[in-house]
Image (cartoon, coloured by chain):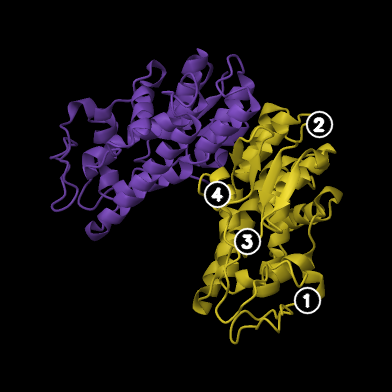
Chain colours: A yellow, B purple
Amino acid sequence: MRPTVYHIPVCPFSQRLEILLELKGLRKAVAFNVVDITQPRSPELLAKSRGSTALPILETEDGRVVKESLVILGYLEDRFPEPLVAQADPYRRAVENMLIAMEGDVTTAGYRFVMNRDEKSRDQYAAAMEAQYRRLDDFLRWQSPGSTFLFDEFALAEVVFTPLFMRFWFIEYYEGLDIPEELTRLRRWREACVSHPAAQQVTREEVVKLYFDYAMGAGNGALPAGRSVSSFAFKPHWTQRPWPPRQKWGDAATDADLGLN
Amino acid sequence: MRPTVYHIPVCPFSQRLEILLELKGLRKAVAFNVVDITQPRSPELLAKSRGSTALPILETEDGRVVKESLVILGYLEDRFPEPLVAQADPYRRAVENMLIAMEGDVTTAGYRFVMNRDEKSRDQYAAAMEAQYRRLDDFLRWQSPGSTFLFDEFALAEVVFTPLFMRFWFIEYYEGLDIPEELTRLRRWREACVSHPAAQQVTREEVVKLYFDYAMGAGNGALPAGRSVSSFAFKPHWTQRPWPPRQKWGDAATDADLGLN
């Protein structure tokens, strides 16, 4: 019996847990159980999560539950402390935690942007996203101007942000916005994060194809109007489908356009 | 030379740090420097905070800066680990952190509610506040049905939430809303929190008087229309002023009504 994580396919918050375990050489210490979000949640799972549909959750060997990816990361660090991925020095740990404290706003800006369905508001969402990129760049220049990672190597801050950088491939694809060129410190960090060997659980193609419905404003396995198969469906497998149209406005792609039937 | 916290008067986030240090018997290990928020921030302070006006910040003995109250709490725990206030057991620590992860939404609901200036939206804000109270009560019933505190004693979750319970005296006073009677588990927790000896840095009278301007929609030392002295002013001292009117709608109280001139 191992701790079990319940998660949705390509979930960035669950990928954090996988990366952390990879860094510890303990990927197999935890079972990962994919939930099909195109179906209603099972009563068993809702009982575990105390009625919430938010995932991932971790179930311990004796049936107790931990929610919230950052809390689960801390739990895994405490349970499997060798090697510790978080900083050990108090000040370095504080710097790491200040950066991690910014992840919520970054996540919100990115997901709101890709899910926005009001074309007139597009530039406003783009500006909010850029503002988050600028904050991150400024933080890195403040605390770590000369490095690539926040400190010497890929560590806890990188575990938290790398899955977001990878999901935000959907922003570059569907919204045409990338980290501005002049934010060279942030770009250097992002580049090193997404190419790190411990963080290769997903590919750009997979993210772009599966998250197509988000660009249509439908999150968490909901179906966009006029469609009958979710872009998160397990079949047809994403490797068997064409790349979706980049254009999120105008006529929406059909199941057939997306290779979903 | 000691670490120095810069904070605004009666700031709940700064009170967290004071409570933590009290529990450790180390209140004097950190200097607390009150910033007059009725005046513009000094360039020196803005340089320390990297341009942000958010407080508290902690400056270390060698001039490095830590921001965000939860991050500062972690830093103080790491710097002064005896006694540790956070849970030591990994699962208990996870439970504590799940509860602490709810503080952001609770804070937002309370502050938005008291600062709302649209009377027609009042019930909507009240419902949002009650929803937060219900989430907290449900969490405590889930993880700790039989206790008073989350675990055996006043610990890190209590450090985080007690200052909010105390600030929300402004909700009971200006909005007439308290934790609903039936949320007995949450009420039991709140009662034990606000009466704990380590958490007596502020009084209800002080909170109600200083935060009057928040009820007028003016936060962070800003002046409500028609007023010339902030309710956060150091003089006249709050003990010398009358209790403000509970009525936040209709004719606004003047400087004279508030004993501010």
Q: Residue at x 74, y 53 (%)?
A: A185
Question: Depth-wise, is mark 4 or mark 2 nearer the camera?
Answer: 4
Q: Earlier in the sequence, mark 3 or mark 2?
A: 3
Q: Secondary structure at mark 3?
A: loop
Mark 2 sits on what residue? A83
Q: Quadrant of residue A17?
A: top right
Up-down relation of residue A39 to residue A248 (above or below)? above
The quadrant of the image that shows the N terminus of chain A is: top right
Q: Which residue sits at x=40%, y=29%?
A: B162
Identify the residue position indicated by label 3 in the image. Answer: A37
Image: A31 above or below B161:
below
Measured in 3D between alpha carbons, the distance from the residue under mark 3 to the one under mark 4, in whole angstroms, is 13 Å
* Residue toward you, B77 or B128: B128
Residue B161 higher or lower than A217, as above or below: above
Q: Amino acid at mark 3?
A: Ile
**Residue closer to the observer: A256 or A176:** A256
**Residue designated by label 4:** A46
Q: CA distance from mark 3 to mark 2?
A: 34 Å
Which chain is home to disc 3? A
